[in-house]
Structure formats: C-alpha cells, structure tokens
Amino acid sequence: MSTEVTLFESYEQDFNGLLLSIQSKLSAATAELEMDEADDMLSHLEELLSHIPQTQRSKPAYVSRVRAAKATLTACKKQSRDLYHSATRAELLQRNDQWSTAEPDERTRLLAGHQTLEEGSARLEDSTRVALRTEEVGAEILRNLRGQREQIVHASDTLHTADTNIDRSSGIMKRMIRQMYRQRVIFALIGVFFLALISIILYFKLRR
C-alpha cells in the first residue's frame, strides 16, 4: 500500500469520527467549529486523492468515498442552518407574542431587539453565502492545481521519453561512426596490400 493511500485511510477515519461528533452536536454552537475542521480534513483528503496514481485499481473507490464524505458534510451544514433558522423563527414568534401584550415602552424595546435580530440574521446569511462562495473558489483552485500537476507530470514523462530516445540515437550514431572508421581502416589496409602486391610483381618482372 502506497504512502498516499495510508494517509488517505488515516484522514478518512479521523474525518468519519468528526462527522459523528458533528451529527451529535448539530443543535449546539460547537458544531460550527467542528464543521470548519471537517472542511480542512476534506481538503486534505481531496489533495491526497490527487496524488494516488491513476493506475491504482482501487482509486475509483476512493473517489466515491470522498464524494460521499463531501455530500454528508454538506447535508450536516444544511441541517445546522435549518435548525438555526427554525430556532430564530421560534424566537421571533415568541417576541411577537410578547410584543402584542407588552406596554408601549417595552414594545419599543422589543421592536428594537427584533430589528437587531433581523439584522444579525441577515448578516449571518451573507456570511454563509460568502463562506459557500469561498468554498467553491477553493475547490476550483484545488482542481486547477491538480490539473497543472498532471500536466507537469505528463511533460516530465515526455521529457524523460525524449531523453531516452536521444540517448539511444546518440548510441546508434557513435556505433555508426566507429563502424565507419573501422571500414576506412580496412579499406586503407586493402589498398596498402594491393600496392605492395603490385610493387612486388613489378619488381620481379623488372628483374627478368
């Protein structure tokens, strides 16, 4: 098992434990902090997933597990927001009941409190939208980084292949050059041999 897979398994185990803790605390404020931690862990899982080789047969299963983990975390976030909005509506209804039976001064205070609560709720919704948008941007950046990494790895493989081909071509050229020099030496020796033979024949003919 590769190092990336081992780390993936470890992070996934911690993430699942954190999800169980979040699901048991959805109505508590502490769940928000754990959701932020779960987001970070999910980012680590996605990063580790990008390092697992495509050739590994079990990678599709890891991809499915990450998608399932992300869907579960998204559902927990939605449930937490729904619980918060339900509690906010219940509090508003209670304040409206109090306002209808309260004295004028108390009504003024309740109205001011109601307005403050509405403003806080609007700010929370804005913050939620910004957080979701930030999460989308972060996910897009991670996808782009993974794509660039794959391009770099592909380019590195191409350069390695080209370097291997160049080495092979260089070896072939060196062998051809050595063969050419050997042929030249052989031709030179043959030429010397024939010159010597002709010289010997001429020498004996001239002596007669």
Image (cartoon, grey):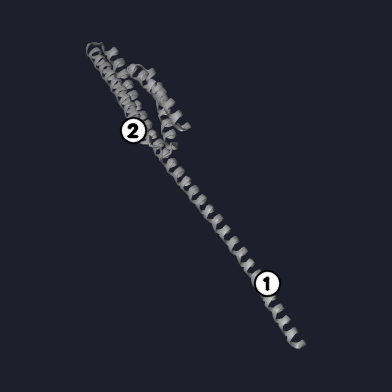
Q: Quadrant of residue 188?
A: bottom right
In the depicted view, which residue is nearer to us: 149 or 56? 56
Q: Which mark is residue 74?
A: none
Label 1, label 2: how far apart the Cα atoms are: 74 Å
Front of the two marks 1 and 2 = 1
Instruction: Check the image and report above or below for 30 versus 7.
Output: above
User: What residue is drawn where x is 48% and y is 48%?
Assistant: 157
In the depicted view, which residue is nearer to us: 162 or 189? 189
Q: Amino acid at mark 2?
A: Ser
Disc 2 secondary structure class = helix
Instruction: Check the image and report above or below for 184 versus 58.
Output: below
Neighbour tally class for label 1: few under 14, some 14-19, many 20 plus, Cα within 10 Å: few
**Label 2, on which residue?**
64
Report the quarter where the N terminus lies.
top left
Q: Position of residue 125 (x, y in %)?
A: 33, 28
Residue 186 placement, left or right of 151: right
Furthest residue to the right? Answer: 207
Disc 1 secondary structure class = helix
Q: Amino acid at mark 1?
A: Leu
In the depicted view, which residue is nearer to us: 42 or 156? 156
Residue 142 placement, left or right of 114: right
In the depicted view, which residue is nearer to us: 92 or 41? 41
Q: Quadrant of residue 65?
A: top left
**Label 1, on which residue?**
189
